Amino acid sequence: MPALTRRTLLKASAATAASFALGAGLAARAGTAAPLTLDARFGAARLVEGGAETRVMTWALSDAPSASGDAPSASGAPPILRMKQGQPFAAKLSNSLDEPTTVHWHGLRIPNAMDGVPEMTQPYVYPGDGFDYAFTPPDAGTFWYHPHCNTLTQMGHGMTGVIVVENPADPVFDAEIVLNLRDWRLGTDGGFLAPFKPRDAARGGTYGTVRTANWQRAPQFEAPAGGLVRLRIAATDVTRLYTVGIDAPAAVLALDSNALTLPSALETLDLGPGQRADIVVRMPDGEGAIVTLGNLRGSNPWTIATLVARGSSLKRDLREAGPLAANPIAQPDIAGARRIPLDVTATAEHKAGTSLCGSLGYTFWAINKVPWPGDTPDPIAPLAELKLGQSYVFQIANRTPHAHPIHLHGLTFHVLSSNKRSVLPPPTDTILLQPDEQAELALVADNPGDWMLHCHIIEHQKTGMSSYLRVV
């Protein structure tokens, strides 16, 4: 495997249900979809050197693979679920685990009843039971799915899968590679270690010991020589922040499922848990040439995955990729918007209450000085009550020395300003707030219901950094 250094990567990159109303602009189309069966189950995977097996939690498609889901991965990773923008999708969750679970469709602006948050949008799905999800994705892009029940354990034990919502009007690429980036907290025997350390949960979070893409360590993929490859990257880890770089000409097409106005040359790109990126890579012309995608964060860069060029050169030009189509995100009325302060802070440590879906037993964090007591909303009031169709600007401030990927369910916001950014991202559902960052986030409250707002470092979410907005 080629050596990876910050200098070589920087040098190379520099060279280049459905009946629920959705609100204004989000109404589902009429029609039904043949449901697939998504089975939450235990499995086995070989994740550590030496061949020791790990008992994992995962999903599997009980039906034969169809247009709605890729064939199971040889590694045991959850299937990639494929949907089409503006077309109905349906899935039945079947719970074969020994504890309750749900499915949250991360980043999708769908009816509140389909959002997968127990006691807020749906009942718990107990062992042996099921739940029918049905919705029409209004946006194209790269999304992902995970439980919102006992999240640190269930996600940490494997339950994170990628969703691809296709737009037939997208530019034509010569290959597509989907990468699900995540850590595992495993000992050398393949068994799980304790999911967190309280001291780390009160800081940046507890890191895993085994780093994978698609449940493999530094996997290699073949791609057409001289071709344009679309990388769909989802950071589904419970803790890790990434600084992505690649040693080939590349450009960023979309962030968090929303297209940039024009593709932007990739130098490095920061991604926090919950975030996604669509990147186009121009492969080398020579047969067998290697491209390395790496994580440059920290003092010891490491390889995420490699691509190897195969065949005669297609001699594509990176500029042929062109921009992706914009999703139909409402534009807020900034002048008439109500402004709401949103402070992300630490809080005095105390014991958290019990929760059916799991509590870490501590609170370290808060939003607007209120720590969320586990997974359930009661008796916490919403952070704010928003009027359907109205515009709002959230004045968010990170009052801590740690980064926090703040994720909002069911809605998409525009980053208007930041004291830490020279370039603002496209519309998004997640902002990686840097230490001491202050930003303005504008949105139209166009999707009714109760929508969670939380840090996607799961230890932070589970120890207080969570709340919700109510759109009525």
Image: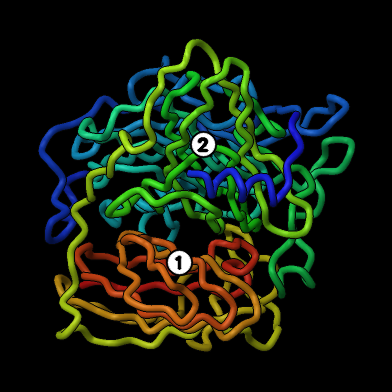
Q: Which residue is drawn at 29% across and 34% down?
A: 166
Question: Which sits in the foreground, 167 or 123?
Answer: 167
Q: Does residue 409 appear anywhere in the picture?
A: yes
Residue 36 as seen in the image, left or right of residue 419: left
Residue 140 appears in which quarter of the rendering? top left
Q: How busy is the neighbourhood of tag 2: few (under 14 within 10 Å), some, or many (20 plus)? A: many
Residue 95: mark: 2
Q: CA separation, marks 1 and 2?
A: 32 Å
Question: Which sits in the foreground, 141 or 298?
Answer: 298
Q: The disc labelled 2 sits on which kind of residue?
A: Asn
Instruction: Find residue 464 and report its horizontal and vertical position in percent.
Output: 58, 75
Instruction: Find residue 386 and report its horizontal and vertical position in percent.
Output: 24, 78
Question: Which sits in the foreground, 152 or 75?
Answer: 75
Instruction: Find residue 429 and report its horizontal and vertical position in percent.
Output: 38, 61
Q: Residue at x 56, y 83 (%)?
A: 436
Residue identifier under label 1:
431
Mark 1 lies on a secondary structure that is strand
Q: Which of marks 1 and 2 is nearer the N terminus?
A: 2
